[in-house]
Image (tube, rainbow, N blue to C red):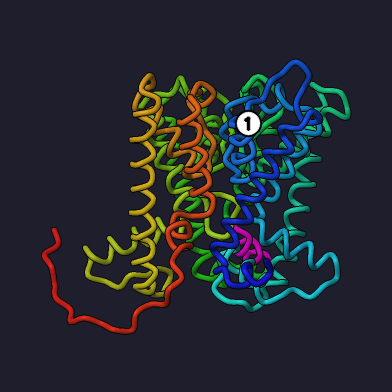
Amino acid sequence: MKTFIKKQPPGRLIAMGFAMVILIGTCLLLTPWSVRQGVTVKPVDALFSATSAVCVTGLVTIDTADHFTVFGQAIMGLLIQIGGLGVSSVGVGLVIAAGKKVSFKSRTMAKEALNVDNYKGVVKLVKAVLCMTLGFELAGALLSFLVFSRDYPFLHAVGISVFHSVASFNNAGLDILGGLQNLIPYGDDMFLNIVTSALVIVGGIGFPVILDVARNRSFKKLTLHSKVVLVTSGGLLLSGTLLLKLTDHLTWMQAFFHSMSARTAGFSTCSLGEFSNAGLFVIMILMFIGASSGSTGGGVKTSTFFVLLQAIRSEFSKRRTGAFHRSIPRENVFRAGMLVITSMALVCIGTFLMCVLAPQFDFVQIMFEVVSAFSTAGLSTGITPELGFAAKVVLILIMFTGRLGVMTMVTIWVTRPERQTRYTEESVMIG
């Protein structure tokens, strides 16, 4: 077994690790200790819930609070934590906690999971990630408790606060308030809206950016990646707020919250089923772009979106592809283009399959659920609980692919080395 594991590439091991955690979580959610008395949880719904938690998505076919006991809810929270940090990062953290030496294979997997370029300081980065996560989630739980303690008994409020903080920081969007109501009862609570938004934004910009900002207080001293993430995230948040305010009858707080949440958080303070098609389209674009590299969120990532915009600008202006007095390598542009194309292909295939398997729903509703599953956003127009077995399986596969990354899923089965031979180049007409 050890020999088999050593021969596997890092991407494949990460995929196997996520799949194993999902299967274990599914089995635990089906135990009598997890399911409430008088309630039946089908295996496909347990699998869907475990996948949604590990892939930090937030889509659900059954309500977490109404169907699972405190033990089951704790399992869901643990799955969210493992999925948000990444299986390999959690594994490295356990090795560090046990006082053992981290192997090169473990460092490689952590490097791949955190999406960093080199091995330098990987172990220190994992330690910092675990400490930051604990700190932010503890602060979020304490602040959320001030709100939930007004409506629930002490221990219940503590449980809801911890779960909400973990789900917010990991951009999961799951809740244990019951009734599939998400945060709609707290839509007018400015304090909880701000706390939730802060946790989601910090969790979504990525751990490398958080560390870079902590080390360098000045914007000029930040790395190019950090500058790109901060500027793009701010621009998308602002433009999303303005567009949602224009397309639907929302308050400024509601428009801001959903602009933030659409970038893979999955929380909602008002029913998305009442949004206009224009508003749903804006949210789909934001979901598809998603969070930032090295974060707990999904999507094609803000840096990918920024690189493509710069490539288009440079093509029209006949200038270099770059920003902030730095040039962007052509390899980055090519990779960004490949990522967006393969992601769009996945969304198209998923939408087609869902249209065939769930023809009773509108096209916009179906495409919204598919984009939400791919980007691990978790926002829903409300049709997910009504889907059939086959449609649920399709969304499960899309969530899994979206969490691992399309490029990772495409390349995990390719083990042969790149060919050294090169053919003579010849141009083809473009456009």
The answer to whether residue 33 is left or right of residue 391 is right
* Residue 147 visible in rendering: no
Residue at image location 75% in from the left, 26% down from the top: 35
Task: Tell me the kind of residue under disc 1.
Answer: Pro
Indicate yes or no whether the magenta region holds residue 60. no
Q: Could you say which quadrant of the image residue 130 lies in?
A: bottom right
Q: Residue furthest right?
A: 154
Mark 1, residue position: 43
* Observer-nearest of 271 and 398: 398
Sort mark 1 into few (<14), some (14-19) or many (20+) by Cα contacts within 10 Å: few
Q: Could you say which quadrant of the image residue 6 lies in?
A: bottom right
Residue 65 placement (x, y as % from top left): 72, 25
- In the rendered view, tell whether residue 373 sits above or below residue 154: below
The magenta span reads 206-214
Q: Quadrant where the N terminus lies?
A: bottom right
Q: Quadrant where the C terminus lies?
A: bottom left
Q: Could you say which quadrant of the image residue 22 lies in?
A: top right
Residue 104 placement (x, y as % from top left): 67, 77
Indicate yes or no whether the magenta region holds residue 211. yes
- In the rendered view, tell whether residue 310 sits above or below residue 287: below
Q: Residue furthest top?
A: 38
Secondary structure, magenta segment, majority class: helix
Q: Secondary structure at mark 1?
A: helix
